[in-house]
Amino acid sequence: MFLTKLLRLGVASVATGGLLICMNVASFADTWPSRSIKLLVPFPAGGAADTIARIYADKLSEALKQPIVIENRPGGGTAIAADAAAKADPDGYTLSLAPAGQLTVLPHLNKAITYDPFKSFAPVSLLASVPYIVAASPSTPTSSIKELIAVDKKEPGKLTYSSCGLGTLCHLSGELFKNLTGTDFLHVPFKGSAPAINALLGDQVNLAFDTLTVLAPQIKDGKVKGLAITSRERSPLLPNVPTAAEAGLPDFIVDSWFGLVVPAATPKDIVQRLNTELVRIGNLPDVRERFSAQGLNVTTSTPDAFTQTIHADYARWGKVVQASGIKFD
């Protein structure tokens, strides 16, 4: 009899405790946010990623009625910011701008990273994307993808291409192109897009694979030749540059995307609130105009759709890394 009463008391206590926990979580979510929010950006101030973060942060701050503080954490190929985000309290007060390479490329190349691209974060929404451009230096004897492939076939391994760094999407875009076309270019990595494009401008390399944002001004000014864009449609910024599909490479589709993630255990209703606001912000005409002027596309999504994108691109770039034998020291 005593044991039965004790068991009943225990069950009641557990039920009450569970109810209190639920009430606390609900109360916490209902009062969020009650203070400033931190947004980690894995690049220095001034670049495209920083611009994306600040445009969304300004609008999101207005919607949530709390300051959003941008904290630039460059380094480690974006791993430093990712590590900080993964270790942050899952309370909705730490957000992280996640570029494609951070979640889908770096884990294949650097086994020492401390975060898991699938388990450490809760994807909130994609924010923006930018396609890549295949560009040739002024003296390289080609003005189309077809001619480029033909030139390489005559003298395999002679042509060179620059990238913004070993293991970056600039690099992997070049490797994907080689895999799809059977070409054999020599990779010349640089520490960032600026020196990589300067090498192209100076005819130190024949080709470059970089974003529309980086290459559009050089192509518009006639300083380099735009051979193809890796999007499904031509860009208004470069209407004369054909898509890769138009150039005969329908599978050469590359988007450098940026999304927002939070620590994995962040309450789902906070994730959903953030998603709702980000999608709304992405549909604002002034936001779309500001992005379009820089060659960026607004690409907001549901958390599930963002998750699927991460998994699909992780598998895709993993195959490219494996096929190319890329080593990352």
Image: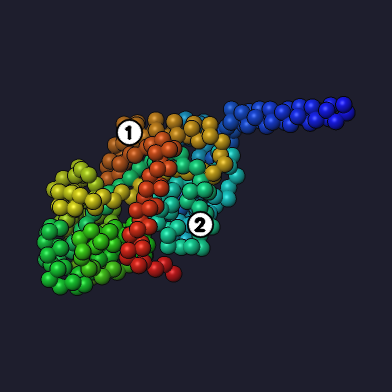
Mark 1–mark 2 contact, CB under 8 Å?
A: no
Near-viewer residue (66 or 131): 131
Label 2 sits on a secondary structure element that is helix
Which residue is at 48% across, 48% downward? Answer: 118
Q: How many marks?
A: 2
State whether residue 70 appears in this view.
no
Check the image and name the residue furthest to the front: 1
Near-viewer residue (142 or 199): 142
Which residue type does callout 1 highlight? Asp
- Which quarter of the rendered picture does the C terminus lie within? bottom left
Q: Position of residue 37 (x, y in %)?
A: 54, 40
In this figure, which residue is indicated by the disc labeled 2?
80
Check the image and name the residue furthest to the right: 2
In the shown orientation, is residue 306 left or right of residue 81?
A: left
State whether residue 87 appears in this view.
yes
Near-viewer residue (171 or 215): 171
**If you read the primary sequence from the N terminus, does the residue marked by circle 1 or circle 2 appear first?**
2
In the shown orientation, is residue 304 left or right of residue 207?
A: right
Which residue is at 24% across, 47% downward? Answer: 231
Quadrant of res 127: top left
Label 1 sits on a secondary structure element that is helix
Q: Nearer the viewer, mark 1 or mark 2?
A: 2
- Label 1 to label 2: alpha-carbon separation: 32 Å
Which residue is at 16% across, 68% downward? Answer: 152
Crowdedness near tag 1: few (<14), some (14–19) or many (≥20) residues, C-alpha within 10 Å: few
Q: Position of residue 250 (x, y in %)?
A: 20, 49
In the shown orientation, is residue 219 left or right of residue 297?
A: left
Up/down of 119 relative to 199, above or below: above
Q: Position of residue 14 (x, y in %)?
A: 74, 31
In the shown orientation, is residue 125 left or right of residue 217?
A: right
In this figure, which residue is indicated by the disc labeled 1?
286
Which residue type does callout 2 highlight? Ile
